[in-house]
Image: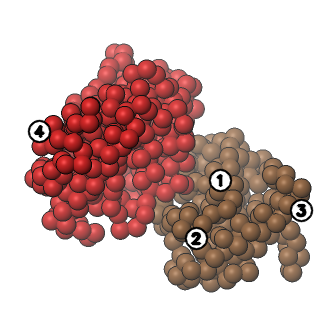
């Protein structure tokens, strides 16, 4: 239960970090909060020869609330984002999801960008990046590039980041006016990995639903967005066919069985959670008229 | 892979319970082992070593974190409070044995919030930090505050009581201080 030996690198800039990653290649791994990586090292599921510890890299610890989006640097801890009033006013979905990320002691250390780069299907924040149609900003030896969630998440724990690239920030775009969100998950104990989780964003204009989208935790291999506008669009929130939306979710998800829950149970949970969060988001969209989103 | 026999050592200085402490350790030294083996502060207990049990929780710059999920080299120059340091808090008071206890420690003693005591250091650090954030928790909030710490003896009932009692003791001691928040 102790990590294998590794060489510790403590770069002070993004350029230096990328340069080290380039030198060590496949034998290198980036350490930010380490709340997923260090358990893996402790259990020796991985034993990289080099850890590039970015905790001392300047300027990566910023949350920027901008007109179009919320930009989160690679060293922003989950707890900092969760308690950032500006960011959560611009995108209430951030806090709605973040309070479900493990326990406070883990959120105090773990980073939001790190959780996205880890790409665990049971992670909350990859699903949020997908639902907001966010962007991962990566820095590499050839310069910077921006990656959409669809291009970023390749499989469970697998992303399109090259071994010499560093995810320096993610951007969560704000939703269109009239949109409200909700998030719910079900776990055996509070703070455990969810058996299923659903994030929803519903837009209501003139009392009628004009868009409804969901993304998922623990029931799809990679974060995926299911657009339910065809199912509930055009209805008033009180009269929408949420049961049909839940049915569409059950057909969409591809859960797997494990010691905590069967695949069928997870599928049932995803449908029920979707029904609840969609209805809640639609009701919120009516009451807030989206004023908090712009 | 790195050759174990030539593992490079790093001089790490951490401010533990207000005292700068230095030791020369390999990069892979976990903060939990740094505290226990290198600094001989064995109050911090090591349970699962993958962040699940919460026994090793210490305060890093005042915030609870898992010391088994941090490397000592990353803790360089940070302020660490271990369970040993809670006795030195401004709101710690002498107890019957002559030692000092902070409100959480006092409450766990009064309410039988421990049996074997293995998980207790992690609960005490977690609860101490939590009461700074929420000085008057409800029973439901107290239960959620300790959800990241496992105890295999008590069944948690007395720990929840201890959290609520710790909040009371903390408030009483604050009032003695004329309402000033302890530094």
- Observer-nearest of A236 and B33: A236
Rendered image: mark on residue B176: 3
Between tags 4 and 2, which lies in front? 4
- Observer-nearest of A33 and A173: A173
Residue at mark 1: B133
Q: Do labels 1 and 4 touch, CB within 8 Å?
A: no
The quarter of the displayed image where residue A218 is located: bottom left
How far apart in space, not on screen, are marks 1 and 4 (Cα)? 45 Å
How far apart in space, not on screen, are marks 4 and 2 (Cα)? 44 Å
How far apart in space, not on screen, are marks 1 and 2 (Cα)? 15 Å
Residue at the image point whose x is 62% and y is 84% from the top: B115
Residue at the image point whose x is 58% and y is 54% from the top: B65
How far apart in space, not on screen, are marks 1 and 3 (Cα)? 20 Å
Q: Secondary structure at mark 4?
A: helix
Are discs 1 and 3 both within one chain? yes
* Dot 1 crowding, Cα within 10 Å, few <14, some 14–19, many 20+: few
Q: Earlier in the sequence, mark 1 or mark 3?
A: 1
Q: Colour of chain B?
A: brown
- Of all chains, the one bearing label 1 is B
* Dot 4 crowding, Cα within 10 Å, few <14, some 14–19, many 20+: few
Q: Is residue A262 above or below residue B7?
A: below
* Dot 3 crowding, Cα within 10 Å, few <14, some 14–19, many 20+: few
Q: Secondary structure at mark 1?
A: helix
Chain for colour red: A
Residue at mark 4: A230
Q: Secondary structure at mark 3?
A: helix
Between tags 1 and 2, which lies in front? 2
């Amino acid at each position: 239960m102790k990590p294998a030996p590794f060489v510790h690198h403590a770069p002070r800039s993004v350029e230096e970090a990328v340069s080290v990653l380039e030198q060590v290649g496949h034998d290198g791994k980036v350490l930010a909060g380490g709340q997923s990586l260090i358990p893996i090292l402790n259990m020796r599921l991985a034993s990289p020869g080099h850890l590039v510890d970015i905790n001392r890299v300047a300027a990566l610890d910023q949350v920027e609330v901008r007109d179009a989006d919320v930009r989160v640097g690679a060293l922003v801890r989950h707890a900092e984002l969760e308690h950032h009033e500006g960011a959560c006013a611009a995108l209430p979905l951030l806090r709605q999801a973040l309070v479900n990320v493990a326990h406070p002691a883990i959120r105090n250390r773990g980073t939001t960008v790190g959780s996205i780069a880890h790409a665990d299907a049971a992670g909350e924040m990859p699903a949020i990046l997908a639902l907001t149609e966010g962007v991962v900003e990566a820095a590499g030896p050839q310069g910077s590039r921006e990656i959409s969630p669809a291009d970023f998440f390749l499989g469970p724990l697998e992303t399109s980041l090259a071994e010499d690239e560093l995810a320096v920030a993610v951007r969560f775009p704000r939703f269109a006016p009239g949109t409200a969100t909700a998030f719910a998950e079900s776990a055996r104990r509070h703070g455990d990995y969810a058996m299923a989780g659903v994030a929803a964003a519903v837009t209501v204009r003139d009392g009628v639903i004009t868009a409804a989208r969901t993304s998922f935790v623990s029931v799809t291999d990679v974060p995926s967005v299911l657009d339910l506008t065809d199912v509930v669009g055009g209805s008033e929130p009180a009269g929408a066919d949420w049961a049909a939306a839940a049915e569409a979710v059950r057909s969409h998800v591809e859960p797997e069985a494990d010691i905590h829950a069967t695949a069928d149970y997870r599928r049932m949970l995803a449908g029920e959670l979707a029904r609840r969060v969609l209805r809640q988001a639609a009701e919120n969209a009516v009451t807030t008229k989206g004023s908090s989103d712009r | 892979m790195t050759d174990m026999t030539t593992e490079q050592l790093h001089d790490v200085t951490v401010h533990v319970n207000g005292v700068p402490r230095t030791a020369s350790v390999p990069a892979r030294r976990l903060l939990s082992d740094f505290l226990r083996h290198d600094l001989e502060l064995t109050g911090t207990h090591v349970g699962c070593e993958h962040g699940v049990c919460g026994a090793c929780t210490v305060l890093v710059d005042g915030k609870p974190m898992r010391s088994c999920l941090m490397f000592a080299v990353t803790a360089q120059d940070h302020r660490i409070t271990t369970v040993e340091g809670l006795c030195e808090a401004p709101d710690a008071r002498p107890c019957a044995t002559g030692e000092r206890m902070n409100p959480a420690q006092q409450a766990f003693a009064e309410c039988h919030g421990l049996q074997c005591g293995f998980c207790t250091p992690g609960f005490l650090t977690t609860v101490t930090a939590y009461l700074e954030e929420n000085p008057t928790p409800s029973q439901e909030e107290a239960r959620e505050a300790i959800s990241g710490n496992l105890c295999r003896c008590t069944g948690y009932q007395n720990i929840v009581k201890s959290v609520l009692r710790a909040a009371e003791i903390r408030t009483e001691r604050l009032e003695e201080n004329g309402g000033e928040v302890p530094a």
